[in-house]
Amino acid sequence: MINILFSLLVAVPSHAEVVEKTVAIVNSELVLESDFKDLEKRLPKPGMVDEALLFDKPISSLKGNRKAQLEYLINEKILQSEIKRLNLTITSDRVDSELKDMAKKNHVTEAELANVIKQQGVTLDDYRRFLKDSIEKRSLMDAEIISKLRISDEDALNEYLKSNPNNRPSIDEFSVSHIFFNPKKGGAEASVKRAETVLGKLRSGENFENLAQQYSEDPNFSSGGALGTFKSGEFLPEIEEAISSLKANETTPIVRSRMGFHIVKLTGKKLTTDPKFEAAKERIKSQLLETSFRRQLKNWLQTKRDESFVRVNE
């Protein structure tokens, strides 16, 4: 009897105690009135609010908006509930290790890092709790969403072409050689006559590379008259137009360019990816991944909310 009375006495709060209001219940997690106050304190502090849970709305949309704050807090509690269900909770030792790594990466001592955190208006204990929540959320997102996302090069290319409709997904890459005739040697007419003579030899079956070796007037001559490999748009437009309909190892008639006169041989041709797309590909994939993550997170949260016990008391 005495034990029962004692139990009843300790169970009754004293007049000095204040029972905190429970605003909502999410599975076994409680949204308390103090959570709203804590969220208001976090709002002006950089990085202390998870923007992914706002779904493209600004952080300012939470300020003074109790309904929006409640939605945000319920989503946070759903994440916390899933973290516990999947046993992703981390220890204080892991938090310590993370703080040490942060200090090391920023080339400061742990004490200096603590001072920097305090200068942001955050206590070290609050930051440790925030860091613990962040690591656990990251593990949850990796397991439930990020590991299942797939962004291919084709996805990136389709997105690139939406923004650049006049660009081609692939362009020609060609290798060429030439025999050059310089109009500075005797004038343009004489250069054309020399070119016609060599073209006749070529058409009679003589070897292009040998003729280039004997007759090319290119001051930067390389073996066989090779000019190298070029992508569409990178070479002299007159020559590019002349070789556009050729097959590999075919030659052009005499082509005039601003430099002089050429007989050009197409030694190889293939399609290659637009270099502008290649330069932008990883940035585009990163953007698509972020967009896909936000969309999947919203769907995932809605599914979890439908599966959860959620009761709002106001």
Image (cartoon, rainbow, N blue to C red):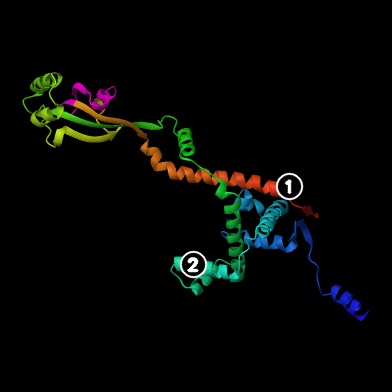
Q: Nearer the viewer, residue 24 or 26?
A: 26
Instruction: Kindly give the residue lying farthest to the right in the view shown.
Output: 1
Mark 1, residues whose alpha carbon is within 10 Å: few (<14), some, or many (≥20)?
Answer: few
Q: Is residue 247 magenta?
A: yes
Q: Nearer the viewer, residue 190 or 243?
A: 243
Looking at the image, residue 283 lies above or below residue 46? above
Q: Please report the residue visible at 55 percent of the width from the left and 66 percent of the height from the top.
A: 120
Looking at the image, residue 161 sits to the left or right of residue 125; the answer is: left
Q: Secondary structure at mark 2?
A: helix
In percent of width and height, residue 186 lies at: 5, 25
Looking at the rendering, the stretch of residues picked out in magenta corresponds to: 239-263
Is residue 62 something one can see in this rendering?
Answer: yes
Q: In the rendered image, which quarter is residue 119 located in?
A: bottom right
Amino acid residing under circle 1? Asp
Is residue 232 something one can see in this rendering?
Answer: no
Q: CA distance from mark 2 to mark 1?
A: 38 Å
Instruction: Say which mark, if any, is on residue 306.
Output: 1
Q: Please report the residue visible at 50 percent of the width from the left and 73 percent of the height from the top.
A: 110
Q: In the rendered image, which quarter is residue 15 located in?
A: bottom right
Image quadrant where one finds the C terminus: bottom right
In percent of width and height, residue 307 lies at: 73, 49
Number of labelled discs? 2
Instruction: Say which mark, if any, is on residue 108.
Output: none
Looking at the image, residue 12 sits to the left or right of residue 38; the answer is: right
Q: Is residue 203 magenta?
A: no
Image quadrant where one finds the N terminus: bottom right
Cβ atoms at labels 2 and 1 below 8 Å apart: no
Looking at the image, residue 32 sits to the left or right of residue 122; the answer is: right
Instruction: Kindly give the residue lying farthest to the left in the view shown.
Output: 186
Q: Secondary structure at mark 1?
A: helix
Residue holding disc 2: 101
